[in-house]
Amino acid sequence: MKTPPILLLSAVVISGILAACTSGPALPLPTVTHVDLSRYAGKWYEVARLPNPFQRDDSNATAEYSVQQDGKVRVINTEYRPDGSTHVAEGSATAVEDGSNSRLRVKFKGLAALAPVPKGGNYWIIRLESDYSTVMVGTPNRKYLWILSRQPFPPQAVMAKYLRAAEVLGFDTGKLRRAAWKNGTPTT
């Protein structure tokens, strides 16, 4: 059976995107000292993100993490689209072997499984509130950034602090897309 050209093209594009996560600015991107994955588990609302090719610009998203018996983290990302439809991406994450759990190697199912994941991880936890209520995740090349919260609207002061931190770390905060939530459900 011959592989359709669109699938081959998609695999090449995804591979290129993920490979680009390993190159970037000369200044290293710091991560938090330690992440307790059992506290990190649960539902997160995306409150802001840099545009990326695997999420529609007009959508909102949630991420749910659960620690499995083998130590891996199950990942379920749900994209909520303006027409009321959803798109779910399932995968798993493993911590980079440095003991901090702040750098994860996330791999999704389906066609995305063909893309290589950098040894140093493609999900870096850059900032995390001590109560695990808000987190900033990015890639070392500063092309991808997500700010997630346990609630659709984190306190303004917390959000301002995260936006300042992202800018100082070299992310293009002028391109951030803010999520539109109403009562925990997406709006357009």
Image: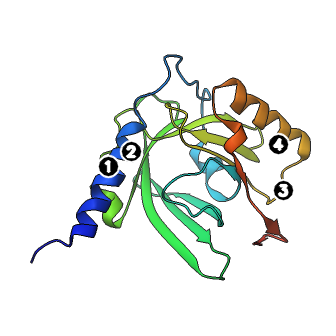
* Residue type indicated by callout 2: Leu
* Residue type indicated by callout 4: Met
- Mark 4 Cα shell of 10 Å, populated few (<14), some (14-19), many (≥20): some
Q: Is mark 4 on a helix, strand or loop?
A: helix
Q: Mark 3 points at which residue?
A: 153
The image's mark for residue 159 is 4
* Residue at 46% from the left image edge and 27% from the top image edge: 24
* Residue type indicated by callout 3: Phe
Marks 1 and 3, Cα distance to the nearest angstrom? Answer: 33 Å
Of marks 1 and 3, which one's residue comes earlier in the chain?
1
Q: Is residue 27 above or below residue 121?
A: above
Q: Mark 1 points at which residue?
A: 15
Q: Name the residue under label 2.
A: 18
Contact check, label 4 and label 2, Cβ < 8 Å: no
* Residue type indicated by callout 1: Ser
Contact check, label 2 and label 1, Cβ < 8 Å: yes
The spot of residue 124 in percent (x, y) is: 53, 37
- Mark 1 Cα shell of 10 Å, populated few (<14), some (14-19), many (≥20): some
User: Depth-wise, is mark 4 or mark 1 nearer the camera?
Assistant: 1
- Mark 3 Cα shell of 10 Å, populated few (<14), some (14-19), many (≥20): some
User: Depth-wise, is mark 3 or mark 2 nearer the camera?
Assistant: 2
Q: What element carries label 1?
A: helix
* Residue at 66% from the left image edge and 40% from the top image edge: 136
Marks 3 and 2, Cα distance to the nearest angstrom? Answer: 29 Å
Q: What element carries label 2?
A: helix
Marks 4 and 3, Cα distance to the nearest angstrom? Answer: 9 Å
